[in-house]
Image (tube, rainbow, N blue to C red):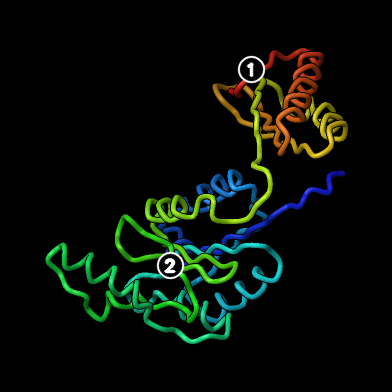
Amino acid sequence: MSDERIWTAAVLVIGDEILSGRTQDKNVAQIATWLDVQGIRLREVRIVPDVEAEIVDALTALRARYDYVFTTGGIGPTHDDITVDAVAKALGVEVVIHPQARAILERYYTARGGELTEARLRMARVPAGAELIPNRMSGAPGIRIGNLFVMAGVPHITAGMLDALTGELEGGAPLVAHTIGAWVPESEVADVLRAAEVAHAGVAIGSYPFFRDGRTGANFVIRSTKADAVAACVAAVTAGVEAAGYAVTDGGI
């Protein structure tokens, strides 16, 4: 077993629109991918409605369990954007207008012939003591306070915020992944996968079956922080699947 420090994170998705099915979440996938590159493992995702008590409860639990927590959604200008208030309550601090956030919003709307209305000023509200996460897309910044990152619900805005945070978080070694695939029912090579994972410490193998054109296949994703361990495990799985009588496609099917 490796004694390497594993840094972990959780994502809290906030919004009735996600739970109702009206909007499909895309942020979890992009945050997870970004975290892998930062050397941080996404361990849990929760989705909660626009209810302050439920947001507070989820934040309290996740912050106690993981190194980092990311929230998405609920930081806009309308009455149901209550994430900032919930975060402040969970942290036991007041909500304040961040002077830099206010200035950013004033410049943003003035440049577009608008003005900083009371509704728009809501997007300058932060828990006391918070720092800002730059937002080049729509002006309204994200929020960083301790191990908590409060981000937009709109995926392309969240992507920009993640870009601004790249290299800013402490993490471990980035995760290396390699995919191979075969036209094989995964049940027929389950023992091959199990044996390969046991034989290669620190490597995880994900099996992802698919059904296409009346045929059954599976892709196998081998992950580790060590490239040589991934390569060795890929070779072992490839040999085992081929020994079972199935051709292997490097890169997956």
Q: Secondary structure at mark 2?
A: strand
**Which residue is disc 1 drawn over?**
249
* Image coordinates for residue 200, horizontal then vertical, percent: 83, 32
Q: Is residue 62 left or right of residue 31?
A: right
Residue shown at the point (57%, 85%) measured from the top left? 92
Give the class, few, some or many, for how many residues have Cα within 10 Å of label 2's Cα (few <14, many ≥20).
Answer: some
Whichever of labels 1 and 2 marks the residue nearer the N terminus, that label is 2
Q: Nearer the viewer, residue 144 or 56?
A: 144
Residue name at image x 48 percent, y 66 percent: 150
Is 133 drawn above or below residue 162 in the view shown? below
Q: Is residue 229 left or right of residue 26?
A: right
The reply to whether discs 1 and 2 touch (Cβ–Cβ < 8 Å) is: no
Q: Is residue 134 left or right of residue 32?
A: left
Q: Amino acid at mark 2?
A: Leu
What residue sits right under mark 2 in the picture? 132
- Can I make out residue 11 in this image? yes
Image quadrant where one finds the C terminus: top right
Residue 90 - label? none
On the question of residue 16 being in view, the answer is no
Count residues near mark 1 (Cα–Cα under 10 Å), then give few for <14, some for 14-19, many for 20+: some
Residue 234 image-quadrant placement: top right
Instruction: Identify which residue is drawn at 84% across, 44% down.
Output: 2
Count of marks overlaid on the render: 2
Above or below: residue 94 compared with residue 237:
below
